[in-house]
Amino acid sequence: MRRKTGLLVAAALVATACRSTSEPESKTLAVGWRPAGSWSGNGNAQTGSFDIGSGGFRIRWETSHETPAGAGLFRITVRSGVSGRPLMVAVEHRGAGHDTAYVTDDPRPYYLEIQSRNVDWSIRVDEAVVGPVSPPSGAKPH
């Protein structure tokens, strides 16, 4: 099963960041993305471990060069970098394609298990980070 929870990741991170503030004025917060790792190949593989301190990340993936046509399979399982247990199947796709899967879980190390048949693949993982939005240079506050 594939879950897309990008909006939930952003909302949860913004709500958490806004919870305890001692400043009288509110600041606009935004979700940004910090690279956590990238991998490519064909066939089955396991990525190196990557740390996610915020608990939210996205997996941008692409498959190509399906040979023979109609025989490609691509699956990414997110695993705990602490225990090794499977946490979720983030991507399950047949053939060539591309998309983004969003994951929300506890802050911890993770790794990905890739199952692939008859396609080349590439993956990029980015961690969700929340921070204040700076006004454009020269802008005056309201």
Image: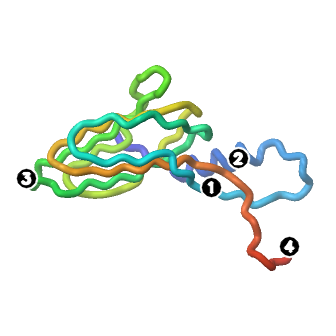
- Could you tell which of marks 4 and 2 lies nearer the N-terminus? 2
Q: Is residue 30 visible?
A: yes
Q: Which residue is mark 2?
A: 15
How crowded pointer 3 is (Cα within 10 Å; few <14, some 14-19, many 20+) is rated as few
Mark 4 near mark 3, Cβ–Cβ under 8 Å?
Answer: no
Q: How is the image coloured?
A: rainbow
Q: Which residue is mark 4?
A: 141
Using residue 87 as the reference point, say whether residue 73 is left or right of it: left
How crowded pointer 1 is (Cα within 10 Å; few <14, some 14-19, many 20+) is rated as some
Residue at 33%, 34% (x, y): give it.
Answer: 46
Whole-angstrom CA distance, mark 3 to mark 2, is: 47 Å
Whole-angstrom CA distance, mark 1 to mark 2, is: 11 Å
**Type of amino acid under label 1:** Val
Whole-angstrom CA distance, mark 4 to mark 2, is: 23 Å
- Could you tell which of marks 1 and 4 lies nearer the N-terminus? 1
Q: Which residue is mark 1?
A: 31
